[in-house]
Amino acid sequence: MKRRDAVQLLAVAPLAAAFRWAPEAVSEASALARAARAGGTPYVPTNFSPQEWETVRVLVDLIIPKDERSGSATDAGVPEFMDFMLGDEPELGTPLRGGLAWLDHHCADRYGKTFVAASDAERAALLDDIAWPKRAKPEHAAGVAFFSSFRDLTASGFYSSRVGVGDLRYIGNTFLAQWTGCPAEALAKLGVTY
């Protein structure tokens, strides 16, 4: 993407704050992502360029990395989820692509390389500038709007996946022979008694 194209996309970056999606679209995209991952063949994105795809894959794992409790956002199929969401809601394309271009151009200005090619420390420094809206500089407003929306989309994809539901330790509608009440440590944390 040329700098001129990126500037055009950034002109509409306030639209990034308008990342809104219907619950039905989230459910459908999550189901399609699961089906694509279950197929066993490598997923080929239909709505992201190869460079955007790699940036999405790196960024979602920075937002939700693998830990001792669950897999990462890529393990959960979040990039595939996002690709399906873009196909379902094309109006997300401009703010999403504009934000990805914003990351690459700011990395290029600071470090002379793309976001994907940057080191972990360089990526962290850039994300620290945009991850905390109240601390962000005014010149980073477009990046802040993008990252806030991208983080929400990542969480939607993750927590609508099997990996995310497992991370929540959600057991679903199961029969309990006896209710012993809320655990004492949870009540203490909430500061309530009954």
Image (cartoon, rainbow, N blue to C red):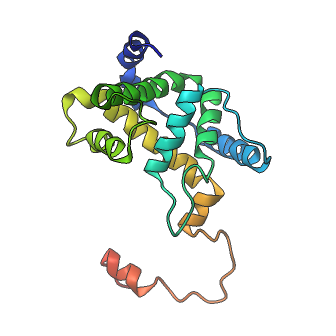
Q: How many marks?
A: 0
Between residue 171 and residue 8, name the one nearer to us.
8
168 left or right, relative to 100: right
Q: Nearer the viewer, residue 84 or 69?
A: 69
**134 w.r.t. 173: above or below:** above
Residue 55, percent from left and from top: 50, 35
In the depicted structure, whether residue 17 falls above or below residue 163: above
Q: Residue at x 56, y 54 (%)?
A: 159
Judge from the rendering whether residue 51 lies leftward or rightward of residue 33; answer left or right.
Answer: left
Q: Quadrant of the rendered structure where residue 90 is?
A: top right
In the depicted structure, whether residue 183 falls above or below residue 31: below
Q: Name the foreground residue: 153 vs 183.
A: 153
Q: Identify whether 168 is placed above or below 88.
A: below
Please tell me which residue is depicted at 44% across the width and 49% down the height of the picture.
63
Q: Quadrant of residue 26?
A: top right
In percent of width and height, residue 133 lies at: 26, 40
Counting from the top left corner in percent of width and height, residue 167 is at: 55, 65
Q: Nearer the viewer, residue 99 or 54?
A: 54
| Residue 192 visible within the image | no
Residue 24's quadrant in the figure? top right
Q: Is residue 128 visible?
A: yes
Which quarter of the figure is the C terminus placed in? bottom left
- List x then y, in percent, for residue 10: 37, 19
Measuring 38% from the left and 43% from the top, which residue is drawn there?
A: 119
